[in-house]
Amino acid sequence: MEKGRLCHILGASRRTEFPILTIRKTLLLAFLFVSLLPAMLLTYLAFHVAGDAMREDIRQSLQIEAESVSQDVDKMLFERLQNAQTWSRLEVMQDIQIRDVDKRLSNFLAELKSGYRNVYQQLLCTDTEGRIVASSSPDNIGLTRPHAEENAFPGTANAAIRLETLQLDNRGDNLPIKAPITSMFNDAKIGELILVFDWGQIYRMLDHAAQERRQIALLDANGRVIAASSDLRKRGALLQKIPAGWIFP
């Protein structure tokens, strides 16, 4: 009898083992669910917030770099305007009235071009009919420059300084800058000083800023690429419309 009772008790103990294990598993799963789910949510939120913050930092960094490059381009072009304005008022410019017979003006322009190294492709002076009277390149003297569209230098009150249309072609990319030459005696216009600015200076500036790590493009008012870093130029981006997604809102 005792033996049967003992077996009965042991059997009862064995039967109650399974519910105990099931409860433990349930509690363990519940604990894991309660602890891990918030941790996963917090991790996701932290990653998402960090990603947004990182993207904003990158955007601001690129914005600052773009503004810095833009200021450098503005400075480069403004210095060219200052050259045109200052040189056009020099006494030697009056020699176009006697067609630079002693070549003093041409020699002066050649010295300026040499002193500024690769900044200018050519410096020249024309009479009121557009004929080249003096030039840093003697072969051009006597030729007539074709009429080109002109615009006032942007961002300045001096409308006397004019820009011809940017030339992007196989002859060498350049931007002609024109300043009137007036007579010292009656202020009448006697000709023009033309500085043919080498647009490659802008390319080199953008190449330096890009340093093979990014791509940089300079746009005109119509959204066309008028200068770009090396990789974009090789891909034919010049004079093309920039993708809308490239422009900061």
Image (cartoon, rainbow, N blue to C red):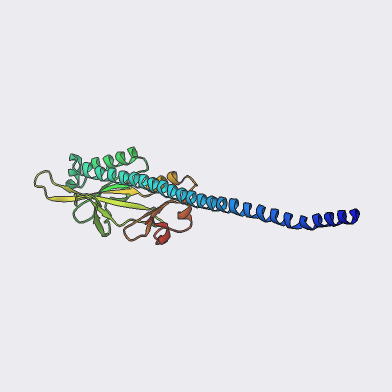
Looking at the rendered image, the quarter that the N terminus falls into is bottom right
Camera-side residue: 78 or 165? 78
As displayed, is residue 91 above or below residue 221?
above
Camera-side residue: 69 or 29? 29
Left or right: residue 47 versus residue 241 is: right
Name the residue at 18% across, 54% down.
128
Farthest-out residue, left: 186
Name the residue at 38% across, 55% down.
248
- On the image, the x and y values in percent for residue 219 come to 36, 56
As displayed, is residue 151 above or below residue 181?
below
- On the image, the x and y values in percent for residue 114 come to 34, 39
As displayed, is residue 192 above or below residue 92?
below
Residue 120 seen in the figure: no
- On the image, the x and y values in percent for residue 163 come to 26, 53
As displayed, is residue 157 above or below residue 110?
below
- On the image, the x and y values in percent for residue 83 come to 26, 42
Name the residue at 20% across, 56% down.
129
The quarter of the picture where residue 226 lies is bottom left
